[in-house]
Image (cartoon, rainbow, N blue to C red):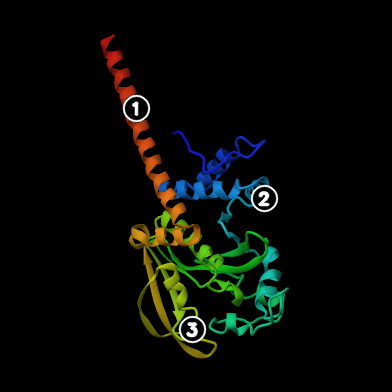
Amino acid sequence: TIYTLAGEILSGLPECRFEAYARAFAGSGLNTTTKYRRSYARLYEAIACQTHATEKKITGIFESRPQDLVGRTIQLEPLEVERHAGKIFQMTNGCAIGSEKEYNPNEIWGFLDYGPFKSVKEISDSPVFQLAENQAAFAVIDSITDKVIGAVYLSNDDPKNLSIQLDLPIIRPTSDGTVQQIEACFLLLDRLFAHGYRRVQMSIDSMDVNSKKMPGRLGFTQEGLLIKNMIVKESNRDSSIYGMLNSDWDKGARNYLFAKLHGKKAQAADEAFDLKEDEIEIQSYLLRLKREREAKEKKVSK
């Protein structure tokens, strides 16, 4: 296929955009949809090749951690005790950091079954880092400062039924509701549905009024209320359940979030690029069939 670049070629790096697109496309895996691979690779290329500095930075990330997910405002990298425990502890213990004021750590941990923590070791030994087999966790890295601003979790993975739970990101109160928090969830949702998951669930304490705003920001549908669903810190928890289906994602939820993160113009360009690539692939396929048919006819005529 003839690939159309997402921007201008960087001086001295004539192949950088092609390389960025190719590594993101291939890195998305063979088990994801072609539409997803095109979209993620196109976005990755645009982010990586803005300037020489971003190209060097994103290439370095790929060379050291090829599994990281790269977004416009954040990157997601697999959560590790050695790399992230100290930073997550510092971010969530309520102490002032730079220009950010001191706060009550229960703003983060109050509705969770663990935390606040008194030390790096304590948080390292907790469920924040000690994951079950059906869980995955990612550190949320700010793209501008390269600092850890939170962590986001997947739990209750059910490959047989193609369902999984997206847990609320653990994030400093000042980052709650920001584009970084939304993009962290978007990157995971997009990859999950591209892998064939049919349903993603969110489960939130019914008393956590602030956190219940998040599913709506992401386009989830409230499905019901589970009474006395859990015991959290020796208290009953009623859980509000929200769901996102693959059909919801394909019919508008993805486009809504993409436009929210990157703008309507970028969302329209993303759709147009996918349609164009579809047309090129169909044309290439028909041309190949024609050549094969002509070769067979030529062989028969001999």
The answer to which of 264 and 27 lies nearer the viewer is 264
The image shows a total of numbered marks equal to 3
Helix, strand or loop under label 2: helix
The answer to which of 293 and 266 lies nearer the viewer is 266
N-term-proximal mark, 2 vs 3: 2
Q: From the image, which quarter does the C terminus lie in? A: top left
The disc label shown at residue 57, or none: 2
Q: Identity of the amino acid at label 3?
A: Asp
Q: Identity of the amino acid at label 1?
A: Leu
- Residue 245 quadrant: bottom left
Residue 26: give x, y in percent of width and height: 51, 44
Q: Give the residue displayed 38% in from the left and 82% down from the top.
A: 226
Helix, strand or loop under label 1: helix
Q: CA gap, disc 2 to disc 1?
A: 40 Å
- Above/below status of 284 relative to 171: above
Q: Which residue is mark 3?
A: 208
Whether residue 102 can be seen here: yes
Residues under numbered marks 3 and 1 in contact, where contact means CB atoms less than 8 Å apart: no
Residue 230: give x, y in percent of width and height: 46, 84
Q: Which residue is mark 1?
A: 287
Q: Identity of the amino acid at label 2?
A: Lys
The crowding category of the residue bearing disc 2, from other C-alpha atoms within 10 Å (few below 14, some 14 to 19, many at least 20), is few
- Above/below status of 235 relative to 53: below
Q: CA gap, disc 2 to disc 3?
A: 38 Å
Residue 58: give x, y in percent of width and height: 63, 50
The crowding category of the residue bearing disc 1, from other C-alpha atoms within 10 Å (few below 14, some 14 to 19, many at least 20), is few
Whether residue 32 can be seen here: no
- Residue 82 quadrant: bottom right
